[in-house]
């Protein structure tokens, strides 16, 4: 989604894509505005279905009790001297914080994709340009989450834990 979003950015005057900073084609997907939009919307369906599936899975298995931040995690940040416990608390905070960010990215994306069908989304953000800015700002937040999440994983279990995610 990032590379197709960068292709859309290049054609978008809001952030100076046409006249300002231009992303080189090696970092973009789609070749032109419509191609970038097609790739972006195709990835959006995968993203939203994956988020829906994750939400259903978390609710059915009741893993939300162990996955998301709770009162014990906030107490641990204040009082615990146990390094692993602190890492797990920060991990749960990151897991909890990413959900509204992803939902915000999806909501603003739907508002930009279908403004005639969902004018209340555009109105909720005040204007079309504000909606685009909020959608664009969700990208660095997701990238920051990925960096923090991987660093916490390395601190919690070292390279063995992070390698086990891929092999």
Image (tube, grey):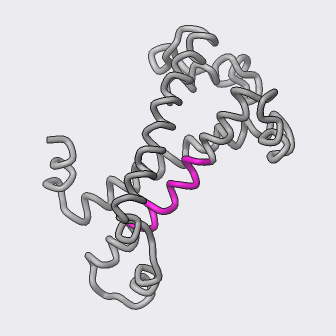
Q: Is residue 109 left or right of residue 116?
A: left
Q: Position of residue 166 (x, y in %)?
A: 19, 41
Residue positioned 65% across, 34% down in the render? 109
Which residue is painted at 60% across and 40% down in the image? Answer: 106
Vertical relation: 57 (above or below) 81: above
- 60 or 10: nearer the viewer: 60
Instruction: For the C terminus, give its image quadrant.
Output: top left
Q: Main secondary structure of the magenta part?
A: helix
Picture quadrant where residue 100 is located: bottom right
| Up/down of 140 relative to 118, above or below | below
Provide residue 130's location: percent of width, then percent of height.
79, 40
- Determine the image quadrant of residue 112: top right
Q: Residue at x 55, y 44 (%)?
A: 140
Residue at the far bottom in the pictured view:
79
Q: Which residues are magenta?
A: 91-103
Foreground: 47 or 83? 47
The residue drawn where x is 27% and y is 84% is 82
Is residue 87 found inside the magenta-colored segment of the image? no
Instruction: Give the number of marks.
Output: 0
Q: Position of residue 64 (x, y in %)?
A: 40, 65
Q: Residue furthest front?
A: 60
Above or below, 158 relative to 115? below
- Image coordinates of residue 47 in percent, x first then y, are 47, 35
Q: Is residue 95 left or right of residue 24?
A: left
């Amino acid at each position: 989604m990032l590379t197709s979003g960068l292709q859309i950015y290049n054609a978008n005057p809001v952030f100076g894509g046409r006249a300002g900073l231009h992303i080189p084609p090696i970092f973009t997907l789609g070749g032109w505005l419509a191609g970038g939009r097609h790739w972006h919307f195709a990835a959006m369906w995968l993203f939203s279905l994956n988020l829906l599936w994750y939400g259903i899975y978390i609710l059915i298995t009741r893993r939300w009790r162990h996955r998301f931040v709770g009162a014990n995690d906030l107490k641990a940040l204040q009082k615990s001297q146990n390094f692993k416990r602190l890492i797990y608390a920060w991990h749960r905070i990151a897991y909890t914080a990413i959900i509204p960010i992803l939902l915000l990215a999806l909501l603003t994306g739907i508002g930009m994709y279908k403004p005639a069908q969902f004018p209340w989304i555009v109105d909720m953000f005040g204007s079309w340009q504000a909606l685009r800015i909020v959608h664009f700002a969700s990208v660095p937040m997701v990238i920051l989450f990925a960096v923090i999440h991987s660093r916490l994983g390395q601190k919690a279990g070292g390279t063995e834990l992070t390698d086990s995610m891929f092999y």
